[in-house]
Image (spheres, rainbow, N blue to C red):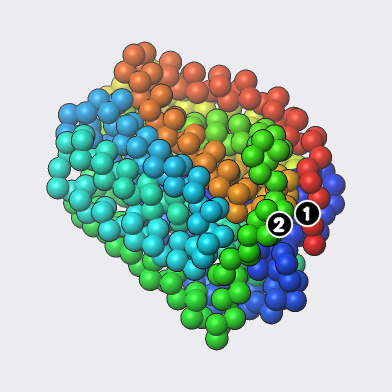
Amino acid sequence: MIRSRSSSSGNGTPSSPAPTGAGADDDGAADTLPGLRGRGFALLIAATATGLCGFAAVLPLVPLWATRGGAGEFGAGSTTAAFMLTTVLTQLAMPWLLERGGYRWAFPVGALVMGLPTPLFALTADLGPLVAVSAVRGVGFGMVSVAGTVLAARLVPHHQVGRATGYYGLAVGLPQVLILPGGVALALNIGFDTAFWLTGLCSVLGAALSWGIWYADGGRNRVALRSTGRSAARDAPAGLPLLRVLAAPLVLMLLTASSASAVITFLAIPLERAAWLVGGALAAYALAVVVGRWSAGMLHDRHRRALLLLPGMVGAVAGMALVTAALWSVGDAPGAGTALLVLLGSAVFGLGFGAVQNETVTLMLNRAGPAGYGRASAVWNIGFDAGSGAGAIVLGLLIQLTGYGPAFAVTALALLASVPLALGGRATRGARSRG
């Protein structure tokens, strides 16, 4: 599910990278951080890549496990929806928690909450317990998602923020190239219980790695793991002013994330008899997301404007249309034409979705300003995860009522209707980063 960040301006005007949270009040303190070459930043990257394996692998596994227990598509989608609901509720509280000491402990505690309950999935395929465990795990993911985004910017001097958030995005995305299809393949060939235990252990290992940031580099990272102070937080836009400047990228993130949830949550169910195709499609999607957002980030830093927001939305629409065409009349044994459409559609959608991820988070960070990094991160992650949850529950209901083809067609049309917002988001001038 998870995402990449870049610090360059997304408003069409040049802007220097904003100072990190540690340096928003004191640039000198920020410049003493070990930065990209420090052990603390390396631990964050390792903790992210390892810990979020427990997120990516479970997303398609739990709905598939639920259908084995007799749940329909609506019930299967409700497991993802429950996970995302508690994720979003937790993210709402994260700016408050971070400003009260949470920078140090939010990531490791969240990774533990996400990982320790995962083996409980193996005990039963009944829908009620699956929804309950998913809801608990969502609290942990809500903590990790917001804290990881902000730490990627806070652990480096302000002139390294663009590269730091790019590396963080790679740590989130590259493991999913193997984990998304690998988790399904592992469960189908070895067993769901083994898959749930291994993914849970990954998150626990991520918690241990992230806790080491406090002790790494002779303690020089500790300035980034302390609160910026309530006075700095009050300088950031909040309430309706914040929502107004973030509204367009938030809507784009909601809709594209809901479409991604459709691919991740439901693609394995109609194609279960062609496990190789499910694995290939999820791998193509995950790899394309990484390529899309890394390309958007590099172009953003080079040209200081959002070049790929509109092309990203167009790619997302085109990819979803191809997947829709494949699923409209899929049978028990998908033919070569169906397989090609699924693989190509997943890849094209992933490219577009990755670009939109990077462009929208850049717009939000710059419009909120350095003192509002925590709030911008929370809003962006809420858009991502609320969209994922809503997509799972709504599409599950539509599939039961209309079938896979028509339900995915509704998703493609919703994306198409939002393309004009990408034009506005690209042209709107955001707040220049301070510092």
Q: Are marks 2 and 1 in contact (CB under 8 Å)?
A: yes
Quarter-of-image position of residue 11: top right
The residue singled out by tag 2 in the image is 370
The residue singled out by tag 1 in the image is 433
Q: How many discs mark residues in the rendered view? A: 2
Q: What's the residue at 38%, 71% (across, down)? A: 208
Quarter-of-image position of residue 273: top left
Q: Is residue 289 above or below residue 52?
A: above
- Asked whether the viewer can see residue 83, the reply is yes
Question: Which residue type does callout 1 highlight?
Answer: Ser
List x then y, in percent, for residue 421: 69, 28
Q: Is residue 99 above or below residue 241?
A: below
Q: Is residue 151 above or below residue 39?
A: above
Q: What's the residue at 56%, 56% (across, down)? A: 149
List x then y, in percent, for residue 26: 74, 71
- Asked whether the viewer can see residue 206, the reply is no
Quarter-of-image position of residue 31: bottom right
List x then y, in percent, for residue 359: 67, 44
**Alpha-carbon neighbours of circle 1 within 10 Å: few (<14), some, or many (≥20)?**
many
**Alpha-carbon neighbours of circle 2 within 10 Å: few (<14), some, or many (≥20)?**
many
List x then y, in percent, for residue 189: 21, 48
Q: Residue furthest right?
A: 13
| Secondary element at tag 1 | loop
